[in-house]
Image (spheres, rainbow, N blue to C red):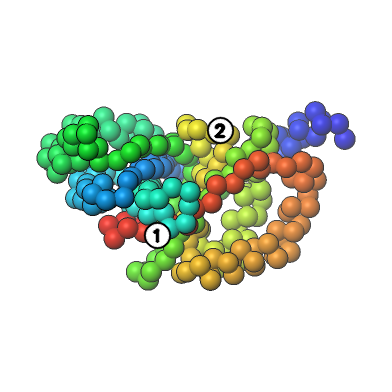
Amino acid sequence: MQRRNFLSAALAASATALVPNASAQATSSREYYQLRKYILRSGAQGKLSDQFFSSALIPALNRLGLKPIGAFKVQFGPQTPTTYLLIPGTSLETVAEVDLLLAKDAEFLKAAQPFWNASAAEPPFERIESTLLKAFEGYPKLTPPSGTAKRIFQLRTYESPTPADHIRKVEMFHQGEFRIFEKSGCGNVFFSDALVGPNLPKLTYMLTFPDMDALNTGWEKFFADPDWKKLTADPRYSFEAIVSNVDNLILTPAPYSQI
């Protein structure tokens, strides 16, 4: 089959697959996520940032109706120390305009003073990077893990070489990957499309596990699952590499994380 015809068929199939049934649309609203990456320096920055997140930022975000807030430290990844914040909400305007809204919150400004007003000679962070995400139609809301047992989180980002390849990769999640993760013992947290941020097109999702042994076992079961093998053998997904780069981080929740 010629590539042009193949892509047209794939895009048409993707559009159908990405639209949930009418009852699901009526009862659920897709969340937006702002995923913030605070790049820090070892030393006093970490303590100041933790105080800011726990005592000023997260309470203020909750007052805006944004909850639960995830706060995670990088355990295995290219940059440490780094803290990730996951900010969920159903209002795009609120999620996107967080800083403008915080600037009007007197209680926040008072609590945030040591962080916000730090001198340029001793800044509280090295850099902040942010990505705006929208939950997949087939997984419209994040699912925090139940219980209080210690857990680790895996944050994965898939970049695709073309928009068409990206759409097909998103389709794969809707065609079975959510279910295969669950069968394999992987805890689904959220699945999302990047709307604004670097290295587009891409998608980002998060899984959770009790520990690294459970993570490795979960992925072994995932790749061995007959449904996964059948899905990856489908010519719509296997005729070329639809993922060009994978970013994989292992995170631990901060004491003040709400996820």
66 or 206, which lies in front? 206
Q: Where the C terminus falls, by quadrant?
A: bottom left
The residue lying at 68 percent from left, 62 percent from top is 223
Left or right: residue 228 versus residue 111 is right
Q: Is residue 123 visible?
A: yes
Looking at the image, residue 76 lies above or below residue 193: below
**Splitting the image into 4 quarters, where does residue 224 fall?**
bottom right
User: Which quarter of the rendering shows the N terminus?
Assistant: top right
Q: State the residue in front, 129 or 203.
A: 129
In the rendered structure, find residue 252 and report the number of the disc placed on it.
Answer: 1
- Mark-to-mark CA distance, 1 and 2: 26 Å
Q: Which amino acid is tagged 2? A: Leu
Dot 1 lies on which element?
strand
Say left or right for 214 vs 143.
Answer: right
Residue at 59%, 61% in the rendered image: 181
Residue 8: x, y in percent? Answer: 76, 31
Residue placed furthest toward the right: 1
Q: Position of residue 227 (x, y in %)?
A: 71, 60
Q: Residues within 10 Å of mark 1 (few under 14, many from 20)?
A: many
Type of the residue with mark 1:
Thr
Residue for badge 2:
200
Residue at disc 2, secondary structure: loop
State the residue at coordinates (48%, 48%): 78
Q: Position of residue 161 (x, y in %)?
A: 66, 35
